[in-house]
């Protein structure tokens, strides 16, 4: 391969890498005295209009999203022979593939990197975009602060990154970036792509079928496989249908998260990257930090909010583990329209509801549910009005365990506290609490359990009052009874 001397206004310094569709060069921008990565469409694909359009789609997506968790694109151009090129930020910290080639990361760093990858993919999913090709080569690192020696010689990858700082770097101090969106498509049209898209070992099973609908759950599969690569004992060549033994020091619950993420059937996986990230947080045993969930500009705002609301105190008190029995003589009782859900109402609350909207049982009828609140009509829309939703579903019990169902209800604008299990009434509840929420309710609790006698999965979403006592949530859960 004869290297070009210039690409547009940029002086070419060296080859960074190449793949099936493109070649990536390290270029120098003389106007800014800065290095850039220049991705050029491969000659053999230049005249394929579909591939050419997909190549330019990457530039359009990155330009439109312009997010710090994604590799940024600066401009596009065209060579004299007609091949398009993208000018992108140079990720001087290298790729995950490069770093894993030097040996496994420490478990703590590997968990952090996996969580950061999920947060980056969640940005795509929030904009209805599916990546389709999540691999170690498409995860890049940007040193923070920027590396001083940009001329350091390093290994290369086809996404335009080199390893800066030697093989002993584990990424623990670097920003994680998602790269190579050339296969990404809007979810609305993803099923129209007939060419096989993805990398074996990381590609979801449905991507082998040209007629299958490929959505965010395909990326969840890729996240699960990345987790196996980062945390497994055997490396990335294991059977994608199995989750191998994980390394010592990996929290026990992580294996279940990876197993669900890599389920062969999309319906059995987490619905998107945000849900995967929340499940990982809960499995690790510590809620996601603001730094994991929000860009830097939001961190100080979150800290100010935490200081004003006393987040730590709220997490320690409002969601305590006290549990009185079913109910005392002063409680009023609320019942859904079928009579299958009965609740002891907090003082001043009332219950209403004729069914679980959007959730139907095998008979086609709405499954039972109710809302209870001091003002049930205002509860869904007024941030200040507390309340709770309680639903019972036989069909959900066939597809989810309580922890998995709770994980499908992430609250990205909140700070998660560690999940817990508690037995209240006749139910073993899996409970996750979210505090310091920037939108919606100030605090919210997600809880689920299996009702006795195989009645179904019972789900409660609770927004406690601002002055809630330490035992409010557990008292409410203890007051829920399910009948056949």
Image: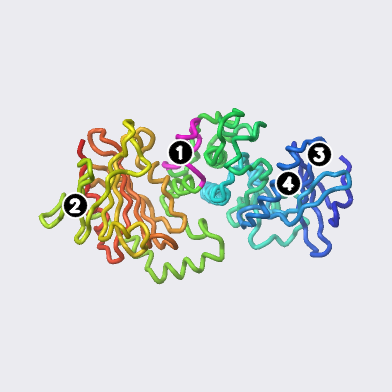
* Residue 344, numbered circle: 2
- Which of discs 2 and 1 lies nearer the camera? The answer is 2
Residue that badge 4 annotates: 56
- Which of discs 4 and 1 lies nearer the camera? The answer is 4
Q: CA distance from mark 3 to mark 2?
A: 68 Å
Look at the image and tell me in which quarter the C terminus lies: top left
Range covered by the magenta-colored residues? 252-273
CB contact under 8 Å: marks 3 and 4: no
Q: Residues within 10 Å of mark 4 (few under 14, many from 20)?
A: some
CB contact under 8 Å: marks 2 and 4: no
Residue that badge 3 annotates: 46
Q: CA distance from mark 4 to mark 1?
A: 38 Å
Mark positioned earlier in the residue sequence (2 or 4): 4
Magenta segment: does it hold 263?
yes
Residue 112 lies, in percent from the top left, at 53, 51
Q: Is 205 situated left or right of 193 in this image?
A: left
Q: Is 164 situated left or right of 448 in this image?
A: right
Q: CA distance from mark 2 to mark 1?
A: 37 Å
Q: Residue at x 85, y 51 (%)?
A: 7
Q: Residues within 10 Å of mark 1 (few under 14, many from 20)?
A: many
Residue that badge 1 annotates: 255
Look at the image and tell me in which quarter the N terminus lies: top right
């Amino acid at each position: 391969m004869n290297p070009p001397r210039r690409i547009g206004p940029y002086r070419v310094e060296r080859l960074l890498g190449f793949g099936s569709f493109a070649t990536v060069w390290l270029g120098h921008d003389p106007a800014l005295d800065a290095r850039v990565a220049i991705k050029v469409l491969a000659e053999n694909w230049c005249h394929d209009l579909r591939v050419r359009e997909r190549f330019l789609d990457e530039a359009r997506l990155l330009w439109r999203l312009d997010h710090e968790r994604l590799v940024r694109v600066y401009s596009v151009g065209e060579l004299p022979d007609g091949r398009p090129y993208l000018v992108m930020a140079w990720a001087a910290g290298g790729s995950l593939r490069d770093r894993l080639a030097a040996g496994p990361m420490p478990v703590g760093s590997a968990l952090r990197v996996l969580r950061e990858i999920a947060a980056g993919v969640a940005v795509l999913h929030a904009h209805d975009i599916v990546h389709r090709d999540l691999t170690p080569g498409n995860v890049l690192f940007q040193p923070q602060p920027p590396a001083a020696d940009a001329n350091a010689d390093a290994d290369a990858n086809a996404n335009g990154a080199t390893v800066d700082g030697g093989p002993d770097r584990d990424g623990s101090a670097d920003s994680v970036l998602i790269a190579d969106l050339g296969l990404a498509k809007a979810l609305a049209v993803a099923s129209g792509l007939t060419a096989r898209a993805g990398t074996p070992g990381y590609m979801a099973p449905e991507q082998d079928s040209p007629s299958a609908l490929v959505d965010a759950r395909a990326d969840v599969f890729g996240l699960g496989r990345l987790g196996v690569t980062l945390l497994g004992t055997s490396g990335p060549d294991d059977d994608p249908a199995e989750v191998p033994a994980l390394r010592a020091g990996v929290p026990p619950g992580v294996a279940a998260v990876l197993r669900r993420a890599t389920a062969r059937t999309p319906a059995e996986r987490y619905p998107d990257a945000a849900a995967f990230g929340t499940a990982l947080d809960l499995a690790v045993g510590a809620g996601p930090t603001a730094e994991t969930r929000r860009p830097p500009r939001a961190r100080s705002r979150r800290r100010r909010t935490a200081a004003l609301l006393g987040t730590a105190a709220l997490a320690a008190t409002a969601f305590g583990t006290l549990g009185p029995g079913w109910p005392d003589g002063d409680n009023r009782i609320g019942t859904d329209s079928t009579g299958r859900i009965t609740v002891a109402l907090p003082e001043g609350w009332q219950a209403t509801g004729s069914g679980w909207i959007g959730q139907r049982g095998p008979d086609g009828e709405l499954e039972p549910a109710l809302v209870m609140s001091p003002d049930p009509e205002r509860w869904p829309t007024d941030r200040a009005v507390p309340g709770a939703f309680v639903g019972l579903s036989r069909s959900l019990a066939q597809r989810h365990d309580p922890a998995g169902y709770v994980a499908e209800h992430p609250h990205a604008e909140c700070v998660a506290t560690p999940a817990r299990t508690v037995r209240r009434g006749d139910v073993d509840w899996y409970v996750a609490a979210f505090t310091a929420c920037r939108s919606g309710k100030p605090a919210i609790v997600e809880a689920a359990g299996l009702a006795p006698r195989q009645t179904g999965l019972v789900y409660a979403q609770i927004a406690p009052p601002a002055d809630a006592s330490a035992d409010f949530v557990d008292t409410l859960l203890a007051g829920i009874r399910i009948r056949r």
